[in-house]
Amino acid sequence: MKKKKRINFKKVIIFLVLLLLIGLLIYYIFNLKVNTVFINGNTILTEQEIIDYTKIKKNDYIYKIVGSDIKSSLLKNDYISSVSVKYHYNGDIDINIIEHEVLFTNNNKYILDDGSFIDMDKTLLGIPELVSYNEELFDEMIDSFNKVDKNILHKISEIKYDVNKRFLLYMNDSIEVYVILNKIENLNKYNEIVNNLNGEKGILYLDTGNYLEKK
Protein backbone atom coordinates (compact mmCIF):
# COMPACT_ATOMS: atom_id res chain seq x y z
CA MET A 1 0.00 0.00 0.00
CA LYS A 2 1.45 3.32 -1.12
CA LYS A 3 1.90 6.10 1.38
CA LYS A 4 -0.16 9.22 0.67
CA LYS A 5 1.93 12.34 0.10
CA ARG A 6 1.27 14.98 2.67
CA ILE A 7 0.54 18.43 1.34
CA ASN A 8 3.03 21.01 2.57
CA PHE A 9 0.55 23.73 3.43
CA LYS A 10 3.35 26.11 4.40
CA LYS A 11 4.84 25.99 0.88
CA VAL A 12 1.40 26.30 -0.71
CA ILE A 13 0.63 29.39 1.35
CA ILE A 14 3.99 30.96 0.51
CA PHE A 15 3.40 30.23 -3.20
CA LEU A 16 -0.09 31.74 -3.10
CA VAL A 17 1.16 34.83 -1.26
CA LEU A 18 3.94 35.30 -3.83
CA LEU A 19 1.42 34.83 -6.63
CA LEU A 20 -0.82 37.43 -5.04
CA LEU A 21 2.06 39.89 -4.62
CA ILE A 22 3.12 39.43 -8.24
CA GLY A 23 -0.48 39.97 -9.34
CA LEU A 24 -0.77 43.12 -7.25
CA LEU A 25 2.54 44.40 -8.64
CA ILE A 26 1.42 43.80 -12.22
CA TYR A 27 -1.91 45.48 -11.47
CA TYR A 28 -0.08 48.45 -9.91
CA ILE A 29 2.31 48.82 -12.84
CA PHE A 30 -0.46 48.68 -15.45
CA ASN A 31 -2.58 51.20 -13.57
CA LEU A 32 0.21 53.60 -12.54
CA LYS A 33 -0.26 57.03 -14.11
CA VAL A 34 2.06 59.96 -14.63
CA ASN A 35 2.14 62.17 -11.58
CA THR A 36 4.78 64.87 -12.14
CA VAL A 37 7.45 65.30 -14.83
CA PHE A 38 10.63 66.91 -13.54
CA ILE A 39 12.96 68.56 -16.07
CA ASN A 40 16.61 69.02 -15.12
CA GLY A 41 19.54 70.64 -16.93
CA ASN A 42 17.67 73.03 -19.23
CA THR A 43 18.68 76.66 -19.56
CA ILE A 44 17.76 77.45 -23.17
CA LEU A 45 14.56 75.47 -23.55
CA THR A 46 11.66 75.94 -21.16
CA GLU A 47 10.21 73.04 -19.19
CA GLN A 48 6.97 73.33 -21.14
CA GLU A 49 8.80 73.15 -24.48
CA ILE A 50 10.53 69.96 -23.38
CA ILE A 51 7.31 68.38 -22.11
CA ASP A 52 5.58 69.34 -25.37
CA TYR A 53 8.32 67.51 -27.30
CA THR A 54 7.80 64.36 -25.22
CA LYS A 55 3.98 64.57 -25.59
CA ILE A 56 3.64 63.28 -22.03
CA LYS A 57 0.41 64.26 -20.32
CA LYS A 58 -0.59 64.02 -16.69
CA ASN A 59 -2.49 60.80 -15.99
CA ASP A 60 -0.99 59.01 -18.99
CA TYR A 61 -0.29 55.38 -18.13
CA ILE A 62 3.38 54.96 -17.23
CA TYR A 63 3.71 51.60 -18.99
CA LYS A 64 2.85 53.27 -22.30
CA ILE A 65 5.68 55.80 -21.93
CA VAL A 66 8.91 54.38 -23.33
CA GLY A 67 12.16 56.02 -22.28
CA SER A 68 13.78 55.49 -25.68
CA ASP A 69 10.84 57.25 -27.34
CA ILE A 70 11.29 60.24 -25.02
CA LYS A 71 14.99 60.37 -25.86
CA SER A 72 14.50 60.15 -29.62
CA SER A 73 11.81 62.86 -29.50
CA LEU A 74 13.96 65.26 -27.51
CA LEU A 75 17.13 64.62 -29.51
CA LYS A 76 15.33 65.97 -32.57
CA ASN A 77 15.66 69.39 -30.96
CA ASP A 78 18.86 71.10 -32.11
CA TYR A 79 19.61 72.50 -28.67
CA ILE A 80 19.65 69.11 -26.91
CA SER A 81 22.86 67.10 -26.77
CA SER A 82 21.88 64.13 -24.57
CA VAL A 83 18.93 62.82 -22.56
CA SER A 84 18.39 60.36 -19.71
CA VAL A 85 15.06 59.29 -18.24
CA LYS A 86 14.29 57.88 -14.78
CA TYR A 87 10.94 56.56 -13.51
CA HIS A 88 9.76 56.59 -9.90
CA TYR A 89 7.36 54.21 -8.17
CA ASN A 90 4.91 57.06 -7.43
CA GLY A 91 4.49 58.01 -11.10
CA ASP A 92 7.08 60.81 -11.21
CA ILE A 93 9.42 60.96 -14.19
CA ASP A 94 12.83 62.66 -14.18
CA ILE A 95 14.06 63.88 -17.56
CA ASN A 96 17.69 64.97 -17.39
CA ILE A 97 19.02 66.80 -20.41
CA ILE A 98 22.31 68.33 -21.47
CA GLU A 99 21.99 71.22 -23.88
CA HIS A 100 24.50 72.30 -26.48
CA GLU A 101 26.37 75.51 -25.70
CA VAL A 102 25.71 78.36 -28.11
CA LEU A 103 29.15 79.72 -28.97
CA PHE A 104 28.49 82.45 -31.56
CA THR A 105 26.00 84.21 -33.76
CA ASN A 106 26.77 84.49 -37.47
CA ASN A 107 24.53 85.76 -40.29
CA ASN A 108 21.35 85.32 -38.24
CA LYS A 109 22.37 81.82 -37.19
CA TYR A 110 23.55 80.37 -33.90
CA ILE A 111 26.71 78.26 -33.98
CA LEU A 112 26.65 75.49 -31.40
CA ASP A 113 29.50 73.77 -29.59
CA ASP A 114 29.41 70.89 -32.09
CA GLY A 115 29.86 73.28 -35.01
CA SER A 116 26.29 73.12 -36.27
CA PHE A 117 24.42 76.19 -37.51
CA ILE A 118 20.80 76.63 -36.43
CA ASP A 119 18.19 79.33 -36.92
CA MET A 120 18.06 82.05 -34.28
CA ASP A 121 14.61 81.04 -33.07
CA LYS A 122 15.33 82.21 -29.53
CA THR A 123 16.66 85.45 -28.09
CA LEU A 124 19.79 84.54 -26.15
CA LEU A 125 21.82 87.23 -24.44
CA GLY A 126 25.59 87.45 -24.17
CA ILE A 127 26.39 85.49 -27.34
CA PRO A 128 29.36 86.97 -29.26
CA GLU A 129 29.02 87.68 -32.95
CA LEU A 130 31.46 85.81 -35.15
CA VAL A 131 32.04 88.50 -37.77
CA SER A 132 34.60 86.58 -39.80
CA TYR A 133 36.50 83.29 -39.72
CA ASN A 134 38.64 81.01 -41.84
CA GLU A 135 36.55 78.09 -43.12
CA GLU A 136 39.61 75.82 -43.22
CA LEU A 137 40.12 76.44 -39.50
CA PHE A 138 36.45 76.13 -38.58
CA ASP A 139 36.66 72.81 -36.70
CA GLU A 140 39.81 73.86 -34.86
CA MET A 141 38.17 77.17 -33.96
CA ILE A 142 35.14 75.37 -32.51
CA ASP A 143 37.32 72.98 -30.50
CA SER A 144 39.39 75.90 -29.21
CA PHE A 145 36.53 78.17 -28.17
CA ASN A 146 34.91 75.24 -26.36
CA LYS A 147 37.83 75.52 -23.94
CA VAL A 148 36.95 79.10 -23.02
CA ASP A 149 35.01 79.55 -19.78
CA LYS A 150 31.45 80.53 -20.59
CA ASN A 151 31.53 83.58 -18.30
CA ILE A 152 34.49 84.88 -20.35
CA LEU A 153 32.94 83.99 -23.69
CA HIS A 154 29.86 86.01 -22.79
CA LYS A 155 32.04 89.09 -22.23
CA ILE A 156 32.96 89.11 -25.93
CA SER A 157 30.80 91.19 -28.26
CA GLU A 158 32.54 90.50 -31.59
CA ILE A 159 35.12 88.07 -32.95
CA LYS A 160 37.08 88.74 -36.12
CA TYR A 161 39.59 86.49 -37.84
CA ASP A 162 42.99 88.10 -38.40
CA VAL A 163 45.73 85.87 -39.85
CA ASN A 164 47.55 82.64 -38.98
CA LYS A 165 44.95 81.33 -36.50
CA ARG A 166 44.86 84.74 -34.84
CA PHE A 167 41.62 86.39 -33.77
CA LEU A 168 40.72 89.88 -32.61
CA LEU A 169 38.10 89.96 -29.88
CA TYR A 170 36.09 93.04 -28.97
CA MET A 171 35.18 92.80 -25.30
CA ASN A 172 32.13 94.39 -23.69
CA ASP A 173 34.38 96.46 -21.43
CA SER A 174 35.95 98.25 -24.48
CA ILE A 175 39.20 96.27 -24.37
CA GLU A 176 40.37 94.58 -27.57
CA VAL A 177 42.14 91.24 -27.31
CA TYR A 178 44.39 89.40 -29.75
CA VAL A 179 44.59 85.65 -29.22
CA ILE A 180 45.63 82.62 -31.25
CA LEU A 181 43.87 79.28 -31.21
CA ASN A 182 46.68 77.27 -29.63
CA LYS A 183 46.79 79.75 -26.73
CA ILE A 184 43.05 80.25 -26.46
CA GLU A 185 43.00 79.14 -22.81
CA ASN A 186 44.87 82.34 -21.92
CA LEU A 187 41.44 83.96 -22.22
CA ASN A 188 40.36 82.14 -19.06
CA LYS A 189 42.68 84.45 -17.12
CA TYR A 190 40.98 87.53 -18.57
CA ASN A 191 39.23 88.66 -15.38
CA GLU A 192 42.43 88.38 -13.38
CA ILE A 193 44.39 90.28 -16.03
CA VAL A 194 41.82 93.08 -16.27
CA ASN A 195 41.73 93.47 -12.49
CA ASN A 196 45.45 94.24 -12.61
CA LEU A 197 45.05 96.89 -15.33
CA ASN A 198 43.63 99.44 -12.87
CA GLY A 199 40.97 100.58 -15.32
CA GLU A 200 43.34 101.13 -18.26
CA LYS A 201 41.97 100.39 -21.74
CA GLY A 202 43.65 99.41 -24.97
CA ILE A 203 44.67 96.32 -26.93
CA LEU A 204 45.52 93.27 -24.87
CA TYR A 205 47.93 90.87 -26.55
CA LEU A 206 47.42 87.31 -25.31
CA ASP A 207 48.96 85.79 -28.43
CA THR A 208 52.55 86.98 -28.07
CA GLY A 209 52.71 87.48 -24.34
CA ASN A 210 50.50 89.19 -21.85
CA TYR A 211 50.65 92.96 -22.17
CA LEU A 212 48.39 95.92 -22.85
CA GLU A 213 49.03 98.48 -25.57
CA LYS A 214 47.31 101.65 -24.44
CA LYS A 215 45.27 103.55 -27.01
Image (spheres, rainbow, N blue to C red):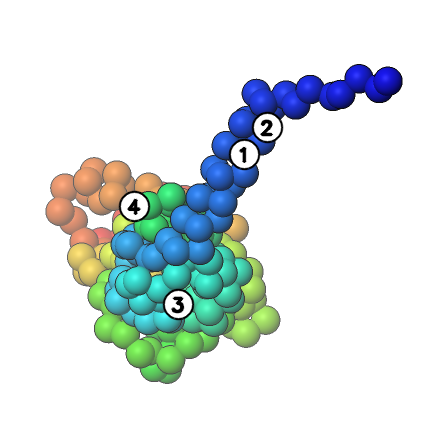
Q: In the image, 180: left or right of 44?
A: right
Asked whether the beta carbons under mark 4 and mark 1 sit within 8 Å of each other, the answer is no
**Label of residue 54 in the image:** 3
- Residue nearest the observer in this picture, 159 or 46: 46
- Residue nearest the observer in this picture, 164 or 72: 72
The residue shown at (30%, 62%) is: 59
Q: Nearer the viewer, mark 3 or mark 4?
A: 3
Distance CA(mark 4)–CA(mark 1) = 71 Å
Is the residue marked by circle 4 packed among few (<14), some (14-19), or many (20+) residues within 10 Å?
Answer: some
Residue hosting label 2 = 12
Position in image of residue 139 (x %, y %): 56, 64
Residue hosting label 4 = 190
Name the amino acid type tagged 2: Val
Q: Sequence-wise, which precedes: disc 2 or disc 3?
A: 2
Inspect this view and state whether residue 43 appears. Answer: yes
Q: Nearer the viewer, mark 1 or mark 3?
A: 1
Asked whether the beta carbons under mark 1 and mark 2 sit within 8 Å of each other, the answer is yes
* Residue at the outermost right position: 1
